[in-house]
Image: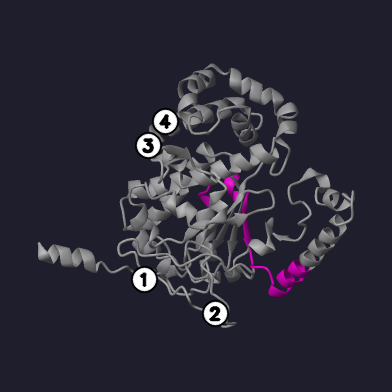
Amino acid sequence: MPRVDCTGKNVDELLAGPYKEAVAAIKADPSVEAAIAKYKDENEEYGFLIDDLFILRYAISHTDDNETASKAIVSTLEWRHENQAMIRPYHITTDAVTGKEVRRDTSDLVADPFTFRSWSLHLAGFNDFSQYSIASIHGTNQHGGPVFYVRPGIANTKEAEHATSPENIKNIFMLTKEPGYSLCDAVTRKTRLLAKSTAIIDVKGMGLSSMPSSSFRKMQTDTSHMTELYYPQYIGKMIMVNIPVILRVVLEGFFLLMPASLKEKMVIAAPPPADRVAAVLAKKKKAAEGVAAEEAVPNNVSAKNKDCVDGGVDSHIFDTYHGIPYENLPSFLGGPCRCGKPRVNYKTGEPMFDGSALDKHGLPVGWCVDGVPNNLKEMIPKIKKEKETSLSSAD
């Protein structure tokens, strides 16, 4: 049976209908029962629930193959147990005032682009690696799932892959999926609609000389397989934009090594035309004004009903960029968003970019993704380490 895309589907209907028997069979598997009994408490202690909704994602990913789904669940729970020291800080933090442990709020990941970075600081080598990478959550798609932006075209991949050990990089690739997956789970439980993430990979500016090494690409391929295993039904769509012609053949070869389930989600696209974005935003503004006026009439609820066509979250947003509302798109992809602030050099604490910079239209450049200017066209330079040099000289 071919894979079924259940993005945005009502999970209660899925559990009561097409996946009822599969979820029951997987739960009854002795190996799954044993793994849940052994590892459930350590996950649910911080709010990561091991229940029917957890199992449903595996049943969907392995439709008509309950045995494989069961093995995947057992492997996932064992992997989470082995990596609890790195996973738990994504869910629990210490209150600065009381000093007590409190749960993190996944909605913060959308409210502040820097939250994603701050939640990952406990990972070994993260600061060194992330100074050269450009990746963060920015906004949501139409089902409330996070939109994860990566800008490898201007990231300094060669410096990043030598900034820390391969083991640390592998952990960074894997463990940074945890907050986005947790957000998808929280949104799904709240809306009862299956939420997944969307990834936007903007390779504008990338050339053959800036391509990552074969060992680095292999690491990316290996972790993509692990993501499909440990974070099922997390990635809804991966959109590659601004691919230079010279790199198409190289990237297509890289795609062939990806899991089949990921390749099915890959889309090569162009950024939306500026006039299209402007027209849609103008139309939505008028529609919003119309809704506000209609709601002013007592007992009139027709406007709210229109917003819930087919029972979908934000389903009235019918003009999107691959499911991403245009108002959430950063300006470097033709959208209106110019949020954020410049990232800092974690060694010195100083901003790496000018926070007062304006673009050619006299507007703030924006730092939507990981604190890097939206209009940046050059690769992030190697960070000088004067502090280390002077200290070692003094010794």
Q: Whole-Å distance between the Cαs marked 1 and 2?
A: 21 Å
Dividing the image into 4 quarters, which one contains the N terminus?
top right
Q: Which residue is mark 1?
A: 381
Q: Is residue 390 visible?
A: yes
Region of the chain picked out in magenta, as a range? 256-282
- Residue ranking furthest to the left: 395
Q: Is residue 222 visible?
A: no
Q: Whole-Å distance between the Cαs marked 4 and 2?
A: 48 Å
Q: How is the image coloured?
A: one colour
Q: Earlier in the sequence, mark 4 or mark 1?
A: 4
Is disc 3 placed on a helix, strand or loop?
helix
Q: Which residue is mark 2?
A: 359
Q: Whole-Å distance between the Cαs marked 4 and 1?
A: 38 Å
Q: Alpha-carbon neighbours of circle 2 within 10 Å: few (<14), some, or many (≥20)?
A: few
Q: Which residue is mark 4?
A: 81
Label 4 is placed on what type of residue? His
Label 1 is placed on what type of residue? Pro
Q: Is residue 204 left or right of residue 279?
A: left
Comparing labels 1 and 3, the label whose residue is closer to the camera: 3
Is disc 4 placed on a helix, strand or loop?
helix
Comparing labels 1 and 2, the label whose residue is closer to the camera: 2
Q: Alpha-carbon neighbours of circle 4 within 10 Å: few (<14), some, or many (≥20)?
A: some
Residue located 41% across and 48% down the image: 172
Q: Alpha-carbon neighbours of circle 1 within 10 Å: few (<14), some, or many (≥20)?
A: few
Q: Whole-Å distance between the Cαs marked 1 and 3?
A: 33 Å
Residue located 45% across and 51% down the image: 220
Q: Which residue is mark 3?
A: 85
Label 3 is placed on what type of residue? Ala
Q: Earlier in the sequence, mark 1 or mark 2?
A: 2
Residue located 85% across and 57% down the image: 296
